[in-house]
Each structure stands twice: as C-alpha cells, then as structure tokens.
Image (tube, grey):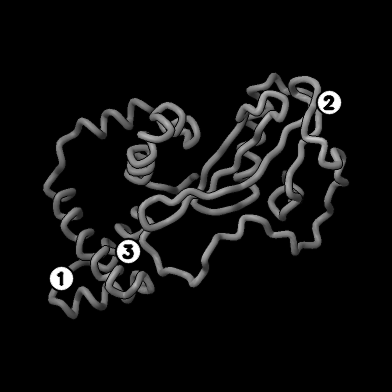
C-alpha cells in the first residue's frame, strides 16, 4: 500500500467502517486510528470544498461516458464545457477516488493459473477438517467494491476454528498482497513450523518471494 495518499486511506476506512469497524480496517491498511479520527474532526478547507465540487463534475462526465472515459477524456470533456481545471488535479482526484476507465468484464479474475512457476502438490485432498489448531490454513484472494474502483483482499483462515488469522488489502493484486496476509497470520499465531498452507496455487502464491 506504499505510495497512496492519506486521503485515500481515510476514504477507504470511512466507507468500510460501518461494515467491518474502524479498528479492523485501520489494522488491515496499516493506517493509524488516530489519523483517521483527527481527519474526521477537521473542518473542510476551501481547497477541499473546491475539490469536492470538481469531483461531482468528474463523476458526472465519467458516468455520462458509461464509465469508459479515463482521465485524459474526462479532462478534455470538462474543458469543452468551460471548466478551467489543472489536468494534474483532475488526474489526482480520479486516482484518489478510484475513478478509471471501465473494462468490459462481468467479474474480476483473482486466480492466474496460466503460469510456469513451480507449484506444490495438493496435500489435503479435499480434507478440510483438521483435528487441531494451526495444522491447516487456507488462503485466497477476493475483491471489494470501493466507490468507482476495487480493493483486492487476501485472507488466511485457520480451518480448525474457521477464524480469519491474517489479511491484507491493496489496489493491485501482487505477490506482496499474499505475503502480507501470510506474515500477519504467521506472526500472530506464534510462528508455527509444522502446518499446511493451502491456496489455489495462482501466480501470486507460486511466486519465488512467497
């Protein structure tokens, strides 16, 4: 999640907090609860109010294009309508609010099995009922709709207790996403040594770093 602006973190926590709680989302994003509540209490500046008004028009133009327009097309359309706005400002607002050109897909693919990386054998043979804690973990990647965009979410579950023991979220589906969720689970469970970690063996899980 490096390189993302503080306002992005704030918006994600603010949007998801009612469903998951502020503490859980802040922990998953490695974002300070203090920073979140401090930002929530701050009065909006003139610049923020101006950005909010501009964002309304950005969303309108984007939706009128059936969400096909990227930032260059949105900027061009706004200029046609007489808006005098800096292109960097529009691009930044679109990025922070996950407003991007819509690809023609009915679903998001979270498993890339078409790779040549080495994979481990299937050790559990569909036996998903371990007899004790920390003997069988299962991990997968899903995604969450946030505003006009998506967040990828990697989750690790201890199949004995059915408890989520690790997770991470990011804007992109990289090997670091599954590494971060694994490290949270492994460190949080006392760094176990003898256990099975089961996944779909997609490219992120089959990466050398993982």
Q: Work out which quarter of the rendered image holds the C terminus and state it.
A: top right
Which of the two marks, 2 or 3, is nearer to us in this view? 2
**Residue 51 drawn at (x, y percent):** 20, 55
Q: Are marks 2 and 1 in contact (CB under 8 Å)?
A: no
Camera-side residue of 191 and 111: 111
**Residue 29 drawn at (x, y percent):** 47, 37
Q: Residue at x 71, y 30 (%)?
A: 159
Q: Is residue 6 visible?
A: no
Q: CA distance from mark 1 to mark 3?
A: 14 Å
56 relative to 76, above or below: above
**Residue 202 drawn at (x, y percent):** 72, 53
Query: Which numbered disc flags the more N-terminal residue, 2 or 3?
Result: 3
Q: What label sits on residue 91 in the rendered view?
A: 3
Q: Residue at x 26, y 61 (%)?
A: 89
Q: What label sits on residue 84 in the rendered view?
A: 1
Q: Residue at x 24, y 77 (%)?
A: 77
Which of the two marks, 2 or 1, is nearer to us in this view? 2
> What SS does tag 2 mark?
loop
Q: Quadrant of residue 117?
A: bottom right
Q: Is residue 149 left or right of residue 142?
A: left
Query: Which numbered disc flags the more N-terminal residue, 2 or 1?
Result: 1
Query: Which numbered disc flags the more N-terminal residue, 1 or 3?
Result: 1
Q: CA distance from mark 2 to mark 1?
A: 62 Å
Q: CA distance from mark 2 to mark 3?
A: 48 Å
**Residue 47 drawn at (x, y percent):** 16, 50
Identify residue for label 2: 194
Q: Residue at x 76, y 62 (%)?
A: 115
């Amino acid at each position: 999640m490096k390189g993302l602006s503080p306002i992005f973190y704030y918006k994600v926590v603010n949007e998801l907090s009612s469903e998951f709680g502020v503490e859980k989302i802040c922990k998953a994003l490695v974002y300070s609860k203090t920073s979140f509540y401090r930002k929530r209490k701050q009065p909006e500046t003139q610049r923020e109010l101006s950005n909010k008004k501009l964002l309304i028009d950005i969303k309108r133009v984007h939706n009128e294009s059936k969400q096909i327009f990227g930032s260059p097309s949105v900027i061009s359309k706004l200029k046609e309508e007489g808006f005098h706005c800096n292109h960097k400002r529009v691009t930044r607002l679109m990025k922070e609010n996950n407003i991007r050109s819509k690809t023609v897909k009915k679903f998001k693919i979270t498993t890339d099995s078409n790779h040549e990386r080495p994979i481990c054998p299937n050790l559990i043979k569909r036996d998903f009922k371990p007899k004790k804690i920390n003997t069988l973990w299962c991990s997968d990647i899903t995604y969450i709709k946030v505003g006009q965009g998506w967040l990828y979410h990697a989750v690790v579950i201890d199949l004995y207790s059915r408890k989520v023991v690790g997770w991470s979220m990011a804007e992109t589906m990289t090997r670091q996403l599954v590494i971060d969720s694994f490290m949270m689970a492994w460190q949080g469970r006392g760094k176990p040594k003898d256990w099975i970690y089961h996944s779909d063996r997609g490219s992120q899980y089959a990466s050398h770093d993982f």
